[in-house]
């Protein structure tokens, strides 16, 4: 924007001393702006309203004069217009005029880059993505926000976009490998969606050597006529150094991994133990033999449990959860950083905690034989598994033992016997087991979906590389704790709903109409029906899963059923949890490692105090926490993929049996038995034929031979390549046990396809 003239400055200065003009007072959101800001400006809504009423582009300075923007306000007004431009609410053309994007037929959205050089714009308002040619992608990087105009259609019939305005360059730092070739330095981003090299002048190389992993700060963003230019801000080291895969993932996915000084300072001020003054107003249940039951490697203990039978009336179940909200208060440094992180991230051999270690492994963790503050859900469960009554209260507890799943299951199954003090815990553990059996029946009656899956654990050698990959066997001790946590979470959601306390719910919606239709069509080919009409219940899914559990194609059918469901999210709008068959569900049991759980604790405490927390901002918090959860999943997947690719480098040429785990237009993904590693059998490796991808049937079909490969088919493969730079493993097809000639193909072709190689 142009600077104000001297006359303009004087007139605005005088205007600022006078009564606010009528045009400013006419702002329907003026009261809100007064409440939010010391120097209230015209609201975004009012600015857009006035621009719409103008009916044409408006000069920036003339608009400022129209609104009587004073000299003192002008810089803030510029910032507001700039923020609105970044958000795509308006744009400023080359004549320095304010324009409404919708009047210019412009679409705002986020850029999704593709490793092959082209990209797409994902519109903010929904709808089909728009194609960006490699030429257009030269101006932006993956993740940037843009305004685009539809410029026609590409050869595949997709809408093609031209970038009109780059609203925001989101990539400030990029992690990748530095190379020096012919005196020219550049960085290739680890994120393959950033497909442009970032030039690094010699004076900005920072001593990096060719081939090293670095973090580069982007000094000049890419444009129509220039490359991105950066400087090395951090040298991480050799690509194959132990732990490098995690260092890369942290920076690639922009995960906060260093606590700011003010957070560390606040954590250091906290006492090392529970103080007497903190126990005031709490129920003292230190006499109850509560215990924690977790995995062998767990270090932060959110929950402790206790159960006692109560004759014919059922059971008393006590679930005590770490009272993080006592130490992390709204608006303080710890709270701001916990929100920023959203959740803890668990990598193999390393955890990025949501809270500093002094809290996550110390003061808040329900460690054995020490006093701890907790929020307790104290439940009365009937003999049929229904929760008859419950109450929440703050308490001080004393965990009597830190137990592991395997340890507890060995005792309950009779494989081992507890000794010493642990023997005294057996009556309560036996009661927990009996309660679990009751809750399990109630779960089946409710119709909750139980998709069976194999979790794996990576075992490392002394050099930090994979020694072996083993399945994690879930025993009933895992499920005992799971059912106890589900019960407490349901009570929390019901409690908050009953008292009309705004909260974040864990929402899992059922399948969309399109996905449901595709699932029904797929199941019909196998002579199966989901039932439930237009709106199936979780019971319908559970009943079908039970029906097919002994079929040889069970894995295929279960996978397709699972993929028909939406991803669970956090939202203030309670839409139920489809998978668990609950009308309302929250996360209450893990406040050490999940921010939404911390908010639920605050909501329950507010009810106990007779207060009501504001609902304002909950939707934004829900979106943020859903994003941080996906971010953590993506980062851990990247690390697992790199480690597994490194592991397979020494197995080139080896043959394995496996199962087709996914079918795509470019080939089959196969999961190897026993070592649980996936690789790609490219379509060119399927045989001498033209293969066509059928998305609805999860199938590749040979045009000439009629040979088909489906999700769940059994195959034998040979390891061909393992590229750690791209974390991709390629397989060749040795033998197929399940692929058959498709009956829909011409008979002659089917017979040809049936011949042995």
Image (cartoon, helix red, strand yellow):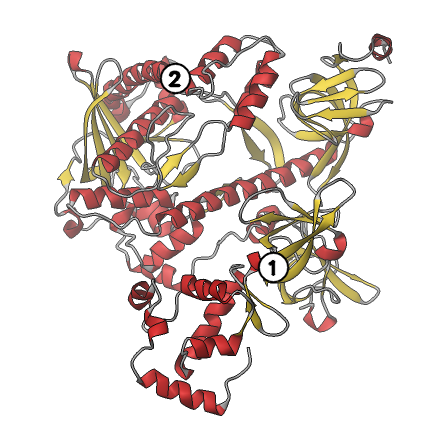
| Rendered location of residue 213, percent (x, y) | 67, 55
Q: Position of residue 36 (x, y in %)?
A: 32, 65
Secondary structure under tag 1 reads helix
Mark 2, residue position: 447
Is residue 111 placed above or below 223 in the rendered structure? above
Q: Which of 123 and 182 is in front in this view?
A: 123
The disc, 2 or 1, on the residue closer to the chain's N-terminal end is: 1
Quarter-wise, where is residue 497 in the image?
A: top left
Q: Residues within 10 Å of mark 1 (few under 14, many from 20)?
A: few
How far apart are labels 2 and 1 at the CA level? 51 Å
Say whether residue 575 is left or right of residue 207.
left
Place residue 685 in its image quadrant: top right
Q: Looking at the picture, does residue 436 appear above or below residue 613?
A: above
Image coordinates of residue 315 in percent, x first then y, are 21, 19
Dividing the image into 4 quarters, which one contains the N terminus?
bottom right
Dot 2, how many residues are within 10 Å of its Cα: few (below 14), some (14-19), or many (20+)?
Answer: many
- From the top left corner, tell me how far across and down residue 329 is, in percent: 28, 54
């Amino acid at each position: 924007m142009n600077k104000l003239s001297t006359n303009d400055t004087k007139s605005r200065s005088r205007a600022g001393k006078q009564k606010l003009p009528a045009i400013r007072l006419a702002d329907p959101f003026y009261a809100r702006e007064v409440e939010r800001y010391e120097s209230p400006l015209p609201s975004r809504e009012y600015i857009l309203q006035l621009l719409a009423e103008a009916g044409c582009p408006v000069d920036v300075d003339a608009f400022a004069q129209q609104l009587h923007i004073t000299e003192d306000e002008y810089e803030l007004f510029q910032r507001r217009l700039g923020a609105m431009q970044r958000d795509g609410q308006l744009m400023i053309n080359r004549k320095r005029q304010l324009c409404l994007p919708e009047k210019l037929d412009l679409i705002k959205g986020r850029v999704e880059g593709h490793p092959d050089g082209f990209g797409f714009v994902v519109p903010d308002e929904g709808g089909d993505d728009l194609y960006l040619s490699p030429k257009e992608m030269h101006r932006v990087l993956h993740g940037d926000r843009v305004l685009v105009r539809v410029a026609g259609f590409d050869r595949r019939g997709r809408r093609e976009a031209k970038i009109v305005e780059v609203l925001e360059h989101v990539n400030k730092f990029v992690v990748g490998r530095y190379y020096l070739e012919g005196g020219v330095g550049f960085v290739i981003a680890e994120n393959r969606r950033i497909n442009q090299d970032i030039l690094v002048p010699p004076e900005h190389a920072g001593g990096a050597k060719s081939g090293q992993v670095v973090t580069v700060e982007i000094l000049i963003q890419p444009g129509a006529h220039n490359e991105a230019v950066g400087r090395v801000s951090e040298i991480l080291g050799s690509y194959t150094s132990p732990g490098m895969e995690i260092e890369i993932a942290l920076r690639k996915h922009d995960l906060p991994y260093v606590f700011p000084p003010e957070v560390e300072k606040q954590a250091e001020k906290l006492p090392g133990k529970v103080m007497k003054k903190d126990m005031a107003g709490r129920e003292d249940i230190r006499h109850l033999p509560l215990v924690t039951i977790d995995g062998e490697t767990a270090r932060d203990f959110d929950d402790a449990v206790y159960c006692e039978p109560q004759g014919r009336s059922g059971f008393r179940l006590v679930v005590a959860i770490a009272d993080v909200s006592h130490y992390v208060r709204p608006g303080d440094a710890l709270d701001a950083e916990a929100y920023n992180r959203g959740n803890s991230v668990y990598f193999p051999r390393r955890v990025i905690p949501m809270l500093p270690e002094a809290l996550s492994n110390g003061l808040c963790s329900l460690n054995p034989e020490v006093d701890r503050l907790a929020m307790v859900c104290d439940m009365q469960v009937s003999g049929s598994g229904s929760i008859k009554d419950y109450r929440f209260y703050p308490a001080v507890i004393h965990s009597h033992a830190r137990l592991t799943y395997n340890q507890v299951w060995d005792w309950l199954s009779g494989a081992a016997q507890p000794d010493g003090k642990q023997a005294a815990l057996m009556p309560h553990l036996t009661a927990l087991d009996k309660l679990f059996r009751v809750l399990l029946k109630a779960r089946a009656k409710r119709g909750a979906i139980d998709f069976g899956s194999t979790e794996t654990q990576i075992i490392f050698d002394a050099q930090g590389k994979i020694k072996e990959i083993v399945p994690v066997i879930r025993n009933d001790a895992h499920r005992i704790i799971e059912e106890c946590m589900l019960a407490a979470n349901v009570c929390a959601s019901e409690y908050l709903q009953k008292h009309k306390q705004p909260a974040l719910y864990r929402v899992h919606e059922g399948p969309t109409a399109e996905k449901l239709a595709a699932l029904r069509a797929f199941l019909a080919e196998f002579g199966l029906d989901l039932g439930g009409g237009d709106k199936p219940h979780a019971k319908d899914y559970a009943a079908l899963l039970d029906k097919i559990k002994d079929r040889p194609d069970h894995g295929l059918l279960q996978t397709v059923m699972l993929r028909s469901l939406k991803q669970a999210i956090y939202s203030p709008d309670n839409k139920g949890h489809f998978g668990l068959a609950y009308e309302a569900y929250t996360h209450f049991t893990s406040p050490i490692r999940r921010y939404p759980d911390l908010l639920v604790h605050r909501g329950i405490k507010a009810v106990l105090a007779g207060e009501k927390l504001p609902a304002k901002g909950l939707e934004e918090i829900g979106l943020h926490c859903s994003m941080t959860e996906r971010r953590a999943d993506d980062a851990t997947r990247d690390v697992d993929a790199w480690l597994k690719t490194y592991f397979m480098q020494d197995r080139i040429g080896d043959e394995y049996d496996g199962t087709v785990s996914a079918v795509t237009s470019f080939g089959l993904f196969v999961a190897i038995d026993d070592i649980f590693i996936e690789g790609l059998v490219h379509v060119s490796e399927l045989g001498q034929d033209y293969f066509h991808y059928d998305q609805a049937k999860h199938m590749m079909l040979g045009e000439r031979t009629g040979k088909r490969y489906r999700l769940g088919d059994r195959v034998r493969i040979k390891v061909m390549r393992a590229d750690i730079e791209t974390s991709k493993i390629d397989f060749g097809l040795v033998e197929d046990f399940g692929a058959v000639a498709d009956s829909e193909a011409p008979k002659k072709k089917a017979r040809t396809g049936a011949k042995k190689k």
